Amino acid sequence: MPTAPGRSWLPLLLWLSLLLPVTGWLFQAQLGQKVDPTNAALKSPDTPDAQNLQALANVVGSDQVVLLVFVTPDGLPMLSRDANLLDEIRATLAKRADVVQCRALPAPEPDLALLATSLRGEDLGAIAQAVVAEARSRCPASLRLLATGVPLLESTLAGLVAGERRTIVPMLGVVLFLAAWLLYRSAGLAIATLLPAVLAIVWTSGLVAVLGHPLDPIAALLDPVLLTIGVATSVHFVEAWRRGITLRFDAPSASNFASTAQGSPTLLATATTMLGLLSLTTSPIPAVVDFGLRAALGVALVHAFTFTLLPTWLALQRSVRLPPIAMDTSPAQSWLRRLRQQRLTILCATMAITVLATVGLPRLHPDNDPLVMLPATERCRVEYDELAARLGGVEVFHLLAPARSPATDPGRLLPFLAAMQQLPGIAGPAGPVLRGPEGDLAAPLLLRPGGSSGRQELFVEIERSAAVLGLDGLVPAGVSVQIARDSDALMKSLGWSTLVTLLLLGIGMCIGLRSWRLGTLGILTNILPCVWIYGAIGWSGQPVSVATGMIGCTMLGLIVDNTLHLLHQYRELRHSGDRAFAMRIALDRVGRPMWLSSGLLLLGFATTATSQLHTTREFSLLACSTILVALFACLVLLPLLVVGDQPIPAGTQRTGHEV
């Protein structure tokens, strides 16, 4: 029965009166969210390396160093006048309250002068920027200043993360809205596709900001992921509403029809997506754990807003007029016929590619260089690369020996240091050996540029050599050590998280579909994208980074949505006819939503691939590849496996079961 026009507005007005004040408050909190200048959430706080870093601070004062390098033009030797000015700059910087010390380092070439500035304070990023700015303002016109260091790089990365939120997410929203508007030719339906996702983003990010959690490079992925997941969920709901309209329901009745039709499959899809995201909480890295929890909360909010707001909103779209369902055509039937004709070719090709991809899996190797997150044209990265090329390296770590360790004996430590400087990853000494007030020793060494995998091997080799020589307690320590080992632990944890996700999704699909056969076929076809993508990465020789590792857990929870909607419809229809008939009707119902949701997801992640951050760009490109393979698995492989060798019925007449 049609609903009275005046009453259609009442639920919406009630919701708006409750939602708008809270949403506005959370939106303001989101806009004011601070950025973590040291990316502390990317570092595990409870590891031995974190403890060694604290012990190192008792010896060296601060491991947060900005390296200032003054270069003369044309390789000419440093003039005495310029050298005197540099002494004044060093003395001025040393007097700053946020500087522990500023010392001159031996220059490997006559046209260079090096100042190592150790920093202290809460906002090391802002301090590093201020120190570099002051040094540049005092730098003689005859010299060029190059600056680098972990605090400077991390503060630059933090600034880019903040900028990404202000540009990428709004641009993504505009692109998806325009695409939905062109698709539906209706602003009301375009708004419907975005409304739950936008509200979920504001509420999730706003709550995170209210709780005082800062933004980091991993957290920056949350908004685009929620937006694309929310749009995919809304598309299925809007398409169900449109199907109700074609069946001659009025708009309010079509809303009720959509709510009923989408209730079970969407709830199952939401639950499996949340399982995939929650598996990230097994990571030792706080940023990844936080991402999993926040994304799971956001997905739950998407589901809640979809089923509370969209029925009322769509009930008001009375001006939409759609043609009735054609009773003599079935696109799914011709699609299944073509698949049936090419069944052997498709299955053999799929098997061959899967075997080839599986062979490439052992070639995967983790490596995560935080420097590559920055654009190649960013000033601090350009200067880092130039200095690394001239000096052999710019990052410092220390060999830390406790007071009671045999390594505190200079007669044993110095030969060991000389031997370690011959290792491929070490460029040479980075200053004198320092002794702490309790007798601990710290010997600084200069690291050559490299990723986390190579550095992890270097640190393991140092510890092994120290143990063989009886230098008990001697360990590598420093920010660079912590970053490398946390990255290695992160890669391993993401691998386990992916396996846990597959197990949980398989069990969840079997229970949700109440069929071991359908659940097994569903999870097998959704494993395919992971195997193909990771196999391709293995064959390409590219390392598994943070973004690459997160694809498995994050995208698995997302791409199963289409599978669940298709198999849910198939299971509901299976009792009314043979397998081929049920699959034909299921594809007629959800085929278009699957294409549209996947297309919008591709468009969304392609938009985020324009990001300056390497992490976001890599994640987006891999997400697009995963969605394409998942679409093939769901629309091509899954129907073939479910239907088997059963012939497609020749009749095209639809029945009442299709309603």
Image (cartoon, rainbow, N blue to C red):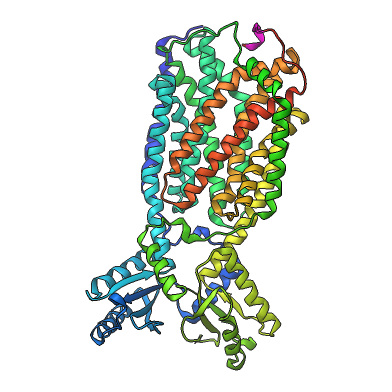
Give percent across and percent down for residue 125: 38, 64
Q: Which span of residues is magenta-colored?
A: 652-658
Query: Residue 460 location in percent, x, y?
Result: 64, 72
Instruction: Look at the image and tell me whether residue 340 can be seen.
Output: yes
Q: In the image, is residue 654 part of the stretch drawn in magenta? A: yes
Position above or below: 227 against 188: below
Q: Residue furthest bottom?
A: 411
Can you tell which quarter of the image residue 75 is in? bottom left
Reply above or below: 564 against 44: above
Instruction: For the C terminus, give its image quadrant.
Output: top right
From the viewer's perspective, tell me whether residue 649 is left or right of residue 150.
right
Q: Is residue 229 left or right of residue 557?
A: left
Q: Is residue 419 above or below residue 556?
A: below
Instruction: Please give the name of the residue rendered at 48% of the width and 46% of the height, measured from the top-left corner.
Output: 221
Locate residue 206, reporting x and y percent. 43, 43
Q: Residue at x 73, y 33 (%)?
A: 348
Q: Is residue 642 left or right of residue 328?
A: right
Residue 278 coordinates in the image, percent (x, y) = 61, 45
Among the 4 quarters of the image, the one containing residue 641 = top right
Nearer the observer, 226 or 290: 226
Q: Residue at x 40, y 29 (%)?
A: 177
Q: Front-most of 164 and 188?
A: 164
Q: Residue 122: which quarter of the image? A: bottom left
Asked if residue 508 shows in the view, the reply is no
Count of numbered marks: 0
The residue lying at 41 percent from left, 26 percent from top is: 191
| Residue 599 drawn in magenta | no
